[in-house]
Each structure stands twice: as structure tokens, then as C-alpha cells.
Amino acid sequence: MSAITLSNEGPVAVLTVSNEAKLNALTMAMLEALDGHLTQIDRDPDTRAVIMTGAGDKAFCCGADIGEWGALSPAEFARAWVRDGHRIFDRLARLSKPTIAALNGHAFGGGLELATACDIRVMTPRATLALPEAKVGIVPGWSGTQRLMRLLPEPVVKEMAVFGRRISAERALSFGFVADVAADALSAAMHLAADLADVSPRANEITKAMIHAAVGEDRGAAIEALGSAAAGASADRDEGVEAFLDKRFPKFTGQ
């Protein structure tokens, strides 16, 4: 049965792409489940970190399930499959919690785009990265030519997307695309997540928003969220709310 499951290891939420019979290929139902999990995680104050991984040891995720999207009309493919998938991947990228992709196996197409939407990545030495969409007559649709371009040199993205070559774990590490190469990617990711116990979750959330604003990842929302947080911590905010509820004019002090 295909699914994206959510489990908790203390303060770490673990999302597992589970569709081993198809190398953890993604269906729309799986993406919708991911969307729901992200809502739950973002609202949970006890969750300090999120790890995304795949079931088994062959693939992290080989991309979108061609058996599902291949039957769609061009309009349905663009409107539903690509745009909805892009929206959900954007949701993952902009999650307030730190995210780690544990690449337990190959990450191809949409699977690579899924890993790219996480903050950092760890990878097993046997895994490879690829953007093979052109081999079935399509192009990357879930940020492979956009977000990935901020993380890898242009020729490397072209090497994968245009020339169809795979990138090894060793090369991915040399480019800084992955933080570590380890035999057990999930254990390495859990070790990284454990480091977050010693830092402020609020400071982490703000720092992540600042970095996203700098690189253009949802810059408008990041700036307004930071501004709203600063305004919300002021005495003027408390006075404004109280005055509204008391049906009187507020007396702002600038504090």
C-alpha cells in the first residue's frame, strides 16, 4: 500500500515515503497526505525537527508515479498534478521547523525535488541523484529547475536534466548539496536532529525565515512573518487588542 506516514521519535517527526513496490513513487493521494502531515507538524509545539525518508533500502523516492499522471490530459497534468505538487513541496520548504532529508536510496525526479525542499540532506554512499524526466517526454515540475538551481551549479543541473546523467553521493557532498554521506542515512539524520535540543526553537524559526528571505524562498511571507512577530511582541499590540475589546481609543506608547 502506498502512503506517506508520520511517526514521532520524541521531538522528531519522521515522514516516510512508503511505496516500495514502485521504488517509493509518489501518487497524488500521498502528496495530499504529506500536506496534512505538514499542517499537523507546523502546529505542534513539541516537534523540534522533521526527517523525510523512504521505506526500504533501494530508493528514497524515484519520483512521480507515471501510472497515475500518464493518463491525465495536458490541462489536468498542468493544473492538478504539477501545480498541486509544487504547492505542497513549497509548503515543505517553508515549514517553520528544521527539516532533514535522509536519502536512504536513489532520489530521482520528484524524489530529488522532495529532498531539495528540505533544509539539509544526508545520503547513503550507494544512492544517486537524477532528473530523468526528459526520458519520458516531460520536464521537472516540482522545482527541479528552480529551487535546485540555488543549491547546485548550473552545469550540474544541466548534466542531470539535459544530459540525463546521475550524480553520485560523493559528488553531491563535494557540491555541498548533502551535509553528510553515511551508511545509515536515517541514523545520521537523527543524530543531526538531536543537536537541535541545545538551541532555541524560536530562534531557529526566525533564523530560517531570515535565510529564506535572503535567498528568495517565499520572501514576502518571510518578511511579513518577521515583522508581525516583532509587532506582536510589543506593548502596543496588547494595548491595541485591549482597546478594541473595550471599545475605546488605544493609548499607544511605542513600547
Image (cartoon, rainbow, N blue to C red):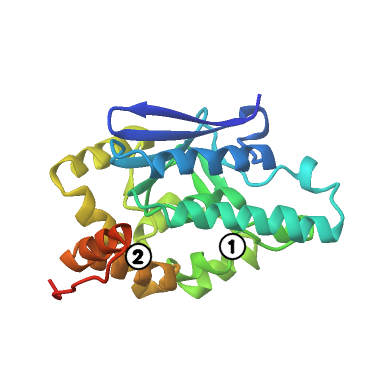
Q: Amino acid at mark 1?
A: Met
**Mark with earlier residue (1, 2):** 1
Residue 163 shown left or right of residue 79 in the figure:
left
In 3D space, how far apart are the residues under numbered discs 1 and 2 (Cα atoms)? 36 Å
Please give the residue where the numbered disc 1 appears in the rendered image: 160
**Residue at the (26%, 60%) spot, across then down:** 206
Any part of residue 109 in sight: no
Q: Is residue 65 above or below residue 119?
A: above
**Residue at point 86% right, 46% down?**
71
Quarter of the figure that contains the C terminus: bottom left
Residue picked out by circle 2: 225
Q: Is residue 56 left or right of residue 137?
A: left
Taking the spot 28% from the left edge, 35% from the top edge, the residue there is 46
Q: Which corner quadrant of the image does residue 151 belong to?
A: bottom left
Q: Position of residue 160 (x, y in %)?
A: 59, 62
- Give the label, 1 or 2, closer to the camera: 2
What's the residue type where badge 2 is placed? Ala
Secondary structure under tag 2 reads helix
**Mark 1 neighbour class, 10 Å CA radius: few under 14, some 14 to 19, many 20 or more:** many
**On the image, which quarter does residue 32 sit in?**
top right
> Where is residue 121 drawn, in percent x and y?
38, 49
